[in-house]
Image (cartoon, helix red, strand yellow):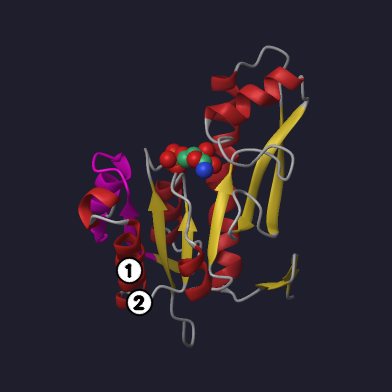
Amino acid sequence: MVNGEKLRIAVLASGGGTNLQSIIDACNAETINAEVAIVICNKKNAFALKRAENNGIPAFYVSKKTEKSMKAVDEKLIFLFKKYEIELICLAGYLKKISAKIIEEFPEKIINIHPGLLPFLGGKGLYGLRVHEKVIEYGMKVSGVTIHFVDDKYDHGPIIAQKCVPVLYNDNPETLAKRVLTVEHSLYPMVIDGFAQKKIRCNGRKVIFDA
Ligand code: GRF
């Protein structure tokens, strides 16, 4: 990003892409100084691809099925990130682990949104509705959203931002998911704007916010 130019981001999604939509909307409304330069999905029928198309954003379906091996998937992703001069990679419901090779190529440039409070409610298999089921099962009174850097372990990288969401006495996983998702939609664009303003960096496990 040079002299006030927009931060070029890639959004990776596997599903409906409501987070993708909130990022696109914030970019279009110019409430954040960023642009979604590409969208990549590992599922052919992901609605996120349609959202990209509807907004004139280059969209790619990249999976083991299209590339024949995981090594080739990595190569394709790296090729696309470079070709489109991507400065920040945002995972938004992307259900594939990012390989060590990609993390190495793009240090401190990959972030993820998680629908629960880390480090407690995360790790392999704890995604989507399963997170909210656990919250209800434990009788937790607060849940929340976490945005973190991506490292080589699931839901493990340095935490950038968290916001709590109350759990109501009559919540079920679906009602809680809905409330959490609404918070995701405002928190993710806000964090991306922090990157656009070059205010967020990492020092080991610590995330530094420059004034
Ligand atoms: C969100 O809850 C996000 O936190 C998680 O996956 C879900 C994706 O939802 N990583 P959507 O596809 O953005 O609607």
Query: Which residue in the structure is indicated by mark 2?
Result: 82
Q: In the rendered structure, does residue 93 fall within the stretch colored magenta? A: no
Label 2 with label 1: CB-CB less than 8 Å: no
Going from N to C along the chain, the mark reached first, 2 or 1, is: 1
Q: Which residues are magenta?
A: 36-61
Q: CA distance from mark 2 to mark 1?
A: 11 Å
Residue 102 pos. (x, y %):
46, 67
Point out the residue furthest to the top here: 170
- The reply, left or right, for residue 205 in relation to residue 149 is right
Instruction: Determine the residue positioned at 48% across, 54% down.
Output: 91
Residue 11 pos. (x, y %):
41, 57
Query: Which residue in the structure is indicated by mark 1?
Result: 75
- Along the viewing direction, whichever of 49 and 68 lies nearer the viewer: 68
Residue 172 pos. (x, y %):
61, 16
- Along the viewing direction, whichever of 30 and 92 lies nearer the viewer: 92
Q: Residues within 10 Å of mark 1 (few under 14, many from 20)?
A: some
Q: From the viewer's perspective, is residue 185 above or below residue 189?
A: above
Say which element carries label 1.
helix
- Along the viewing direction, whichever of 153 and 120 lies nearer the viewer: 153
